[in-house]
Image: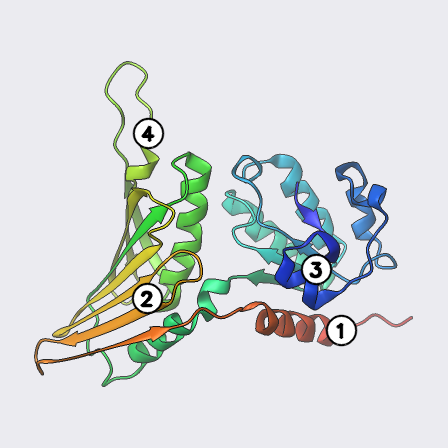
Amino acid sequence: TQLVDGQSAPPELRELLDLPPLAAADRQASQWELLLDDTLCDAVIVAQPSPAELDADRRAEQLRKLAQAGRPMLIAQPASLMPLLYYELEMLREDAGGVLFPYRPWRTHPAVTALVELLDDANGLGRCEQIVLERGLAASDRASVLRQLACDVDLLRLLAGEFVQVSALIPGLPGERAAPAYDQLGVQLSAASGLLVRWSTRGVDPDRGASLRILGGGTDARLELPAGNAPARLEVKSTAAGESWSEEFSPSDPAPAELAVWVSQRDSRPRSAE
């Protein structure tokens, strides 16, 4: 289970936090309860789990205990594939007065920010009728596909609002032991506003990244989000006005801004009298 302190966090977070390391033995999985002690660490970074750990009961129990202890946590999403766990963590957080901050760097990508501003502008894209996202997958196993879907659904919520209905279609392989082909998963979501959203995969192609398209009102907006550090490209075409424009966005490191918000929330939480 990847419950880490600042010294074993990803490089961009390690450079920013510069936390004093716990002893090597203290970071072993068998010693994770030391993170419950606020004299040993100020906060906990919960890294994104491996596919095998997304359904792990042990990881869920660790998160529950940390939330119950009121430990401030920065949690890479998704933390788990068990929906009930998120409700439990929120109730525990509320009772303990802790801070649970989801780390969702895709929300602060400059290209995504520009697209959100266009959607919020009445004269930007006009009436939006449908959003389509196609994703290149890093792997085709169930946990890897669902982890990517969870991240993309959060991005789509940012654009479309809350969802009220979801349906999914996945083909099975022929034969007596038919196995679901998760790399062919298709998901359709309906937002409270009536907006239709579709999510599908491009198969196993980790270098392809994602393609996001917004249709409706005589406007076609396409956002290409390549994998890695390649620049994103937003292209908008207005069939009614016969105009089009495009812009490229260099990737930026979201960690400083995300950490600043997390620290401000942690430091502003009510403190018990000593």
Quarter of the image holding residue 227?
A: bottom left
User: Which of 9/265 is in front?
Assistant: 9
Q: Residue at (44%, 62%) from the top-left corner?
A: 229
Label 4: which secondary element: loop
Label 2: how many Cα within 10 Å (few below 14, some 14–19, many 20+): many
The picture places residue 58, in percent across and down from the top left corner, at 66, 36
Outermost residue, right side? 274
The residue that mark 1 highlights is: 270
Alpha carbon distance from label 4 to label 3: 41 Å
Q: Which mark is residue 36?
A: none
Q: Is residue 163 visible?
A: yes
Q: In the displayed structure, does residue 43 sit left or right of residue 246?
A: right
Q: Are marks 4 and 3 in contact (CB under 8 Å)?
A: no
Depth check, mark 4 against mark 2: the one in front is 4
The residue that mark 2 highlights is: 160
* Of pointers 2 and 3, the one earlier in the residue sequence: 3
Q: Which mark is residue 95?
A: 3
* Of pointers 3 and 1, the one earlier in the residue sequence: 3
Alpha carbon distance from label 4 to label 1: 48 Å
The picture places residue 110, in percent across and down from the top left corner, at 42, 74
Tell me the amino acid under the disc marked 2.
Ala
Determine whether 210 is above or below 97 in the image: above
Depth check, mark 2 against mark 3: the one in front is 2
Depth check, mark 4 against mark 1: the one in front is 4
The residue that mark 4 highlights is: 180
Q: Are marks 4 and 2 in contact (CB under 8 Å)?
A: no
* Of pointers 2 and 1, the one earlier in the residue sequence: 2
